[in-house]
Amino acid sequence: MREANRAAAMNASDLLASDLLQRLRTISHSFCVTEGGSHGPDHSERVLHTALAIGERMGARLDILAPAALLHDIGRKEESLSQGRVCHARRGAELATGLLPDLGYRAEEIEAICHCIRSHRFRGELRPASLEAAILHDADKLDSIGAVGIGRAFLFAGQIGARLHNPELDPATTSSYSLEDTAYREFRIKMSRVRNRMLTAVGREMAEQRQAFMHTFFDQLTRETSGMRP
């Protein structure tokens, strides 16, 4: 039996320890390591674990979810180099189509995996059309909120030289890649809206928990930076 076929019967723990997943991880890291920051290999690893956790609860095909999660951002370098002209989701699916046959995946499995990758951004007409695709979408978005999302936002703010906190400013009056492009600005403009974009019930549940934590964190940060009493 081919390697990819054996993966279909595995639970999450077995799948994570499999040789096939290690091969997929090596491929994923080779594409994503140069991205660093918010979209390095650690992002794909977190998306993998979140997707599998949701997938187990919802009875999804983990053998489709795992490769899709690890490969979902392999087109991001080309998107960055093209300054956004290349869609990393579409390009990632194209790249995965050429990589997966050598790992033993059948045509129908490749199509299912590549649909997940192609639709994980959910921009415009390309809506996730399978349970696995919806789960990958949610897992990717969940990595942008909660404690991890806050950490990524501060990481990006530090990379561009933004200041620590600016709750006194209306985000609409500030600009991206500026001194005022703080983690709090990211929270107000983007992160606070993610929970409304979840496609699965489990994703919505997790997003609500992370949303509550973000409010608590930024309330505390405002108190500390303004000298307010707890």
Image (cartoon, rainbow, N blue to C red):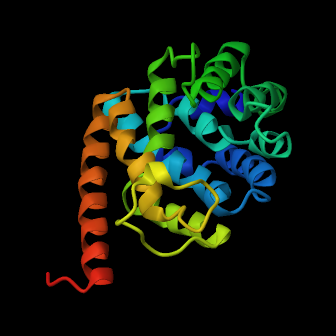
Q: Compared with residue 93, is residue 84 higher up or lower down, i.e. above or below? A: below
Q: Is residue 37 above or below residue 201?
A: below
* Residue 190 or residue 91, whichever sits in front: 190
Residue in the image at 57% along x and 31% along y: 121
Q: Quadrant of residue 3?
A: top right
The answer to which of 90 and 59 lies nearer the viewer is 90
Residue 171 against residue 206 in the figure, above or below? below
Count of numbered labels shown in the rendering: 0
Question: Please, is residue 224 above or below residue 203 in the view?
Answer: below
Left or right side of 171 for 74: right
Q: Residue at x 62, y 20 (%)?
A: 115
In depth, the one of 118 and 60 nearer the eye is 118
Rendered-image quadrant of the N terminus: top right
Q: Would residue 111 be found to the left or right of residue 56 on screen? A: right
Residue 211 visible in the shown view: yes
Quadrant position of the C terminus in the picture: bottom left
Q: Quadrant of residue 59?
A: top left
Residue at position x 30%, y 45% in the image: 206
Q: Is residue 133 left or right of residue 227?
A: right
**Residue 14, horizontal then vertical, whole percent:** 51, 47
